[in-house]
Structures are given as C-alpha cells and as structure tokens.
Image (cartoon, coloured by chain):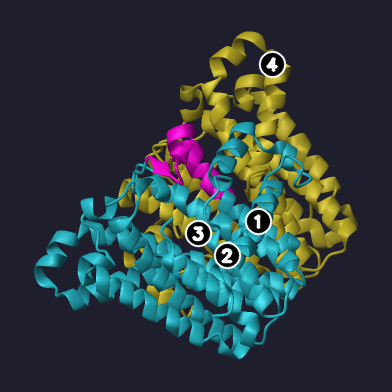
Chain colours: A cyan, B yellow
C-alpha cells in the first residue's frame, strides 16, 4: 500500500465534491429540455435524499476504477452519478413504512417523513429512471452506454438488489422458525446469499461500470468484478460491525437497530473479532486481484481498505 | 382508411400474442444467467401484473410504428416489451394505498392486495429496472439501444410520467380551492398538462421507440412524435369517456370512480359529446401526420382510431 491515508482522504474529498456537484446539475431545473415539467415538490423530494451527503462510496469506486484502468474521471462521472441515484432510490423505498419503516437516514428525517409516502415512492421511481437516462445520454460511445445500462439494471433488478431486499424481508419474517432448525453455518450461508444481492451486486457493478467506461478488456473486467464481490461482502460485514460498535451521531441513524429487530448479522453469527478478521481477509483477497494493474491500482486498493476500516 | 376492422383485429391479436409470449420469456427463471437468484414470490408478483392481459396498446404502437417505418416486428419486440413493463410498474405503484388505493385492475385484485405493499413496491421497481435491461441487452445496434433507453427514461421519469402522477395527486389535493377560483378553460389547460405527462409522453415514446428501432430519419421521428402526442391525448379523453359510459365488467375496474373522487375529467369539463368530438378531431389530425408513410402507415392509423373507439 503506497498511498498514505491523508493523501487518499484529500483525493477522495475532491472526487466526492465533483460527484456532488454533478448530481446537483442532473436534477437542476435546466438539466434537460423537458425539466421545466418537473413539479417543484418532486424535485425537492429527490434532492432531499440525493443531495444529503453520504460517503459516495459507489461513485468513488466507479471513478477510481476508471482511473485505474487508464480512463478519465470526467468520462466516468455520468455512470458514477447514476449508481448513486440507484443507491439513493433503494434507500428511499427501503425506509418506507411498508418496508423497514425508518425515520432517519444520513442524519436527516427519511424522505417519506418529510414528503409523505406517495411522494417518496415517486421520488424513488424518478431517481431510478433518471439513472438510466443519465448513462444513456451522457456516456460515450453508445456501445459502452448500452453495456453500462445493462450492467446496472442487472445488478439492481429482480435478480440483484431488489431480489436481495425481498430475501431480507422474507428472512426477517421466517427468523424464528429458521433459528429453531438451522445451525450457524447454514445461517451464515443464508446471510451471505442476501448480502451478495442486496449490497454486493451494486458494489460490484460500480467496479465494472468504471472498467467499462475506461474500455478495459474483458479479462480485466472479470477480475475487477471479483474484486468488487470481495469488497462488497467486506463492506457489509463492516456495516454490521458498525451497528454493534458504532456511534449513532457519526452513522446518522440508530445503532443496534439490526439486533433489536432480530436480524441476522455477522457479529451476531460469528462474534465481533471473527467478523473483523473475515472483513480484513476479504480485503486482502480483493487487493491481490488488483495486482495486474500495478501502481495504478493503489488508490482503488486504499479505498477498499478505507471503507471497511471506517468508523463513520 | 384501407384496413377493415376485422383484418386489423386479427393482425393485432397475432401481435399481442407475440408480445405476451415474449413478456413471459423475459421474466422466466431462465431469462438471464442470474435469474436463479430471483425469489419465487417476487417473480410471482411481477407476473401477476405483467401477464394479466390488457390491451397491450403501447407495445402494439411500437411494433406497428416499426413496421410502418420499414423495420421488423422481431427487432422491435424488446422495446415493445420494455414499454409494457414501464406501464405495468406505473399501474402497480399508482394502485398502492399510499397513492390511488385501488383494489382491482384488469379484472384482478391489484398487486398489493395479493402480495402486500412491500412486495408490490419491489415488483414495480423490478419491472422498471428490467425494462432498461431488456432494451440495453436485446436492441441492436448499440446506438439505437442507447437512444431508446434515453427516450424511454425521459418519457417515464421526473419530467414525464412520474411528473404527471405527482401533478395528478396535487390536483386532487387542491381541487376544492382551484374550483373556486378558476374557469373551465383554465381547468382544461391544467388537465391537459397532467395528461400530457401522465399518459401522453409514454404513448409518444411508444411511437418514437418503434421509429428508432427501424432507424427512421430524424424528420420522420419528429412527425411521428407529433402523431403520438395527438393519439395520447385522444386516448386519455376516450378513457375518461369510458369511465362515464363504460361497463365495469369490460373495463375490469370500477366505473365512475374518477367522478366519485372529484377528479377533473374531459366529460366533466366539456360534456360527453364535445369530448367525443375532440377525441375524433385529434385522431384526424394524427392520421394526417402519417401521410408521408403512404399505405405503410394504414395499420398504425387504424390502431389509433381503434383505441379511441374501444368500449373495452
């Protein structure tokens, strides 16, 4: 690892700022010729969740992967913003009373608490749709745009992120019966199957989108996709750990909420220490996969370590 | 008009069957390499609404426009199915208790009545996402796929269909205040502004998708887009008329529901006869726009007349 933490931090800050700026531009009243047709409350509802800050992990993964593959940040920005729109829509819908019924997110009241359930559903729908518009309109050449749309849809759709959310809901519903008859190993496999879809596929897609925009060759895309899988799982373990050990003010949402709901978590199944070790091992495995990139992969590796060691 | 009604009917029946078959294939467990990851209940929920029959008006518009522009039905089928997925997702979300709270649709219980609100939200999300995956994966060449993704997203997103749904909700909320201070002419403009976005833009998109798949030249696409706008508005007027004069068993949902809710409608503002005349005039205007296509445009013209004269 040749990037000291403070240099990475300042790099990431600059990139995060560019993402935030571009996101604001994409939902500005002047973003498209037809944008004047957007009702004010809808735009406010979209902005409330999209421009609420956040780590911007997925866009950063897109941008650093594109750079690592010899592409430019500028060319990768539309895809980076699109994946953040998909992530944000999923948070808005997951927080709804019909789903997880959460009141706070990123330190602010959730979308439906401010704008009502109907508007929150529609703002989520609008952000999901806009993600594809942004890629299709602004990613060049068209072959890359089409491949990115297909990738993002596959990762976030009925066999990806949405499937993960369904599996998560079903797991909560069946938690008691399952706990009575299954061992920790079976539970762990079940938990991994949920996370692979619920968060893993979108994080993996961040990496492949970046590689596609940089027009990396298919072999490199495949090995980066494996990197994304490892980081995605490590990230989820870190997130579970944070729910146990974290500080509510820093996370911006309630702590120990998962445990209170009886949700399966890594610390719950493996214990805190073994969970931490597993996350570290996954990151080591992920960084091995970046070796073909040489020093160009250093920032991406540093980002992977950074996101699983965060306490924020 | 050189296509007798019964020949058109048999043509449309055949095309509708191809659309239904392809839609079923796209949500089959074997549709994509990752399809095994789709939870059974999610797929059932998607199928409940997507494979519930219906007129398939939007896909038929895609297919007949493609044919009229010299393209093939086969090449246009992915875009035709995608637009039906977008239409279906919008119905699922609009029917939710947080929105219109409808219990029946296409003669069956609405999605959330069968699968619950959470699953209905997720099935809608999944269908919207799948629409873009299907176009991006299956439409050729990539330039056309990217243009179709952009078109469909623009028509259905924050400045299109979603904006129309928001405006519709806001209009219901402010109906009493507005009625007190505005005249019929202002109300009519307001109603058209809602429908232009809520149903008009997606119907227009059906036409432009078909033209794009057939690689029609930009001038023809522009005049077909105008055709789509006229048909979209005429269709909405016909839909309002059906709500007043229709037969619940044929429509598959409650009759006079709009009036009972105090919703603005064309018959409510203009009267039944003037509404019928307006719809007919719009279809005449639309058919004029097809003249550059010569006899190749006859079926498309017949479809436009057919959908506004339906009592089903």
Q: Earlier in the sequence, mark 3 or mark 4?
A: 3
Q: Chain of mark 4?
A: B
Compute the Cα span from label 1 to label 2. Answer: 20 Å
Same subunit: marks 2 and 3: no
Q: Chain of mark 2?
A: A
Region rendered in magenta: A103-126
Residue B23's place in the image compared with B268, above or below, is below
Query: Which residue position is annotated with label 3?
Result: B127
Q: Secondary structure at mark 1?
A: helix
Query: Which residue position is annotated with label 4?
Result: B184
Query: Which residue position is annotated with label 1?
Result: A19
- Which residue is depicted at the point 85% across and 48% down? B289
* Magenta residue check for A121: yes
**Residue A180, percent across and down?**
9, 67
Query: Which residue position is annotated with label 2?
Result: A6
- Which residue is depicted at the point 56% across and 19% down? B175
């Amino acid at each position: 690892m040749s990037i000291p933490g403070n240099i990475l931090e300042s790099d990431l800050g600059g990139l995060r700022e560019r993402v935030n700026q571009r996101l604001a531009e994409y939902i500005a009243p002047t973003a498209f010729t037809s944008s004047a047709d957007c009702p004010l409350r809808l735009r406010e509802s979209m902005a409330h969740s999209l421009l609420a800050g956040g780590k911007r992990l997925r866009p950063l993964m897109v941008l650093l992967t594109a750079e690592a593959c010899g592409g430019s940040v500028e060319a990768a920005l539309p895809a980076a913003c699109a994946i953040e729109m998909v992530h944000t829509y999923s948070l808005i819908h997951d927080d709804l009373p019909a789903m997880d019924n959460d009141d706070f997110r990123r330190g602010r009241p959730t979308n439906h608490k401010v704008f009502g359930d109907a508007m929150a559903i529609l703002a989520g729908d609008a952000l999901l749709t806009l993600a594809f518009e942004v890629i299709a309109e602004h990613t060049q050449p068209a072959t890359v745009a089409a491949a990115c749309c297909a990738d993002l849809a596959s990762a976030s759709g009925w066999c990806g992120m949405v499937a993960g959310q369904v599996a998560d809901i079903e797991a909560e519903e069946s938690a008691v019966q399952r706990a009575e008859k299954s061992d920790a190993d079976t539970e762990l496999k079940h938990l991994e199957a949920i996370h692979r879809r619920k968060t893993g596929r979108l994080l993996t897609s961040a990496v492949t989108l970046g590689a596609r925009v940089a027009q990396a060759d298919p072999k490199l895309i495949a090995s980066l996709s494996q990197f994304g899988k490892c980081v995605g799982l490590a990230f989820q373990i870190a997130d579970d750990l944070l729910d146990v050990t974290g500080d509510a003010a820093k996370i911006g949402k309630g702590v120990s909420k998962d445990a209170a709901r009886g949700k399966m978590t890594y610390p719950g199944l493996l214990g805190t220490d073994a969970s931490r070790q597993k996350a570290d091992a996954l990151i080591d495995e992920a960084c091995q996969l970046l070796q073909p990139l040489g020093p160009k992969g250093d920032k991406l590796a540093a980002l992977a370590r950074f996101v699983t060691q965060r306490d924020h």
